[in-house]
Image (cartoon, rainbow, N blue to C red):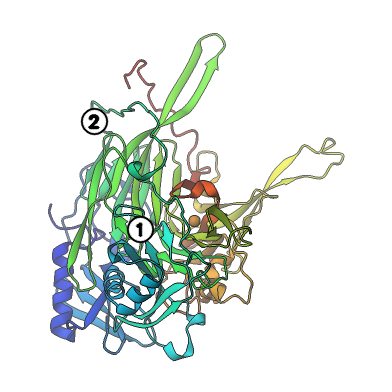
Amino acid sequence: MGAPHPLDPLTAAEFRQVVAVLRRERGVSDGWRFASIELAEPSKDALRAMPASGDAGGVGSVETGGPDRTAGPGPRREALAVCWDTGDGQAYRAVVSLADDAVVAWEHLPGQQPNLTVDEWHECDEVLLGHPRLAAALARRGVTDLSLVVTDVWAYPPSLVPERYRGLRLGWSDVWCRGSEQGSPYAHHLSGLHPIVDLNRMELLELEDEPPGDDHGLPPVMGEYLPKLIPVPLREVRPLHVSQPEGVSFTLDGYLLSWQNWRLRLGFNYREGLVLHTVGFTDNGRLRPVAHRLSFAEMVVPYRDVTADHYRRTAFDIGEWGLGFMTTSLELGCDCLGEITYLDAVLPDSRGEPRTITNAICVHEEDSGVLWKHVDHVFGAEVRRARRLVVSFHVTVANYEYLVYWRFYQDGNIECEVRATGIMVTSYFPAGQQPPTGALVDERTYAPFHQHFIVARLDLDVDGGDNTVYAAESAALPTGDANPDGLALVVRETPLRTESEGRQDYDWQRQRAWKVVNETVRNALGIPVGYKLVPGGTFPAMLDEASPVLRRAEALKHSLWVTPYRADERWPCGEFPTLSERDTGLPRWTAQDRPIENTDVVLWYVFGIHHLTRPEDWPVMPADAVSFWLKPFGFFDRNPALDVPPSRPHGGH
Ligand SMILES: [Cu+2]
């Protein structure tokens, strides 16, 4: 490959260079950790100023055709790094120029806790498993084989941090026990056993140890999922093959992906994981921008249970842990079926050493049922099969997995689906009762209710940068002379003019959706072009205004927030939610109540899974799927998939 495109993720060599520069120029030594290193993405202006690259830029549109040209003067490549001195806990943010091999900015971040790192998770596990106090507590509960024990450290919610531990990089942990060597790591929760850890000194501060029940909270549960460990024989199922004998219909040139009029760039970083850049659709030979950048910017998982095992259990899986860091390798035929193209991802560990996640991103096509059809009563059926291009990645956050699918359709639709699977957190519950804030899932074992909120950051650029968001609502007109049967249904579109108006909630009664319109571009019917955010999987936070959890994640208060684009407004619950008291993201930005009309807007869509646990989710949870859509709404002049060819019957295509 030639020179990287300015949006390409940092390479292993670039990570090493950033680390070397910081060690040399800022004395970042062995006692430090790197929380994150990522590409400092070039500004929109810089991207637009680039020679025609075949990307869907921002303002205006770019002719399609020809290969991606990365030659020519692009923006200078820079990296952002956050690191901290574990000795004094002080964190710093650096901007490093890769071209100049130099630090161009170095900022002290007093009072901020950078994100937690995978290294800390593993090192904490090692320290705890080697600690005599934990071994003694386990022995009292009848657990003597430490090779079966798993710990799982979480960040401490700041409002619950005991006074004596204020200011520490504080973690609390669960302790789990496998039932056998290859038994599920999260099958047996040792309820009431919680180490409290100083993650900078990697030191056990205290060990909460209050075993519940006569059986020390170790009831005989069936928490296994491996075929050899489950008490039921495997059913029969015959092979299902997906075959594309003539190859796939997409091309991937570096990170530039083209398929069925769609064109976009893939990106990846420690925090958001997969990022989709410069998404455009070629219409009549013109590449029309749809989105500048699409990603997940935060995920908040509050457990809605106040018992000793769970009251601290609120995770910020993106801000605290990072979807990129948690990304796991995909396996052909299991995670993805058919003709698959994989991309590896490279991320640094906390010592700055690059690590490759092989097969981190999956790109493939899927059949998606019928695209359109009509049966002419004289001439018979005309039918088109739909297919979709899927760009996906999977993350494993300790016990849980999130599977993220961005799907592009031939008719201009984009669907974003998230599937949650993995193993629920469970703990002991006394026999003969029903837990008030969870569900029994096994013997004397319950899974607390919880919610998975995801904040999608949707930087749409519908046919250019300047857009207006409308709340589009359906209304039935009152019955009257002009509407005698009360049948008239109208749509009311209200422009959202300011950030306070941009705070929107789902409304079933009005079938509210949000249309992102470019007033300066009209379709052939004379109507300004638009894309609609069709909500799905959105639900209220159901957190009291006085709740410290809500104070840390005020972003959860609404289904949608709209802000004017600012390059540095990326994290809806704040840049450093780890041990943070307040949400310094969306509520703070939107308190300015800036105008959002006819400008470059960013939509923040809050959706996810309101997880009322059930026995069927145990011992491993069948994937639960939620999704939302971005649908062209007057973006095209007619059905843009008229030109999809018929399939060849009987196995052809
Ligand atoms: Cu869940």
Q: Amino acid at mark 2?
A: Gly
Q: Quadrant of residue 244?
A: top left
In screen coordinates, is 492 left or right of 165? right
Which residue is more in the foreground, 180 or 24?
A: 180
Spatial distance from mark 1 to mark 2, Cα to Cα? 44 Å
Q: Amino acid at mark 1?
A: Arg
Give the number of marks: 2
Q: Position of residue 311 (x, y in %)?
A: 53, 72
**Residue drawn at (50%, 39%) of the image:** 524
Secondary structure, mark 1, is: loop
The circle on residue 247 is 2
Q: Badge 1 is on which residue?
A: 178
Q: Position of residue 441 (x, y in %)?
A: 53, 52
Q: Quadrant of residue 128?
A: bottom left
Label 1 or label 2, whichever comes before in sequence order = 1
In screen coordinates, is 473 left or right of 183? right
Q: Position of residue 315 (x, y in %)?
A: 45, 67
In screen coordinates, is 61 left or right of 441? left
Which residue is more in the foreground, 231 or 411?
A: 231
The correct choice, above or below, for 584 with respect to 247 in the image is: below
Circle 2 packing at 10 Å, graded few (<14), some (14-19), many (20+), is few
Q: Quadrant of residue 298?
A: bottom left
Secondary structure, mark 2, is: loop
Most distant residue in the top direction:
378
In screen coordinates, is 92 left or right of 610? left
Q: Is residue 568 visible?
A: no
Which residue is more in the foreground, 607 or 281?
A: 607
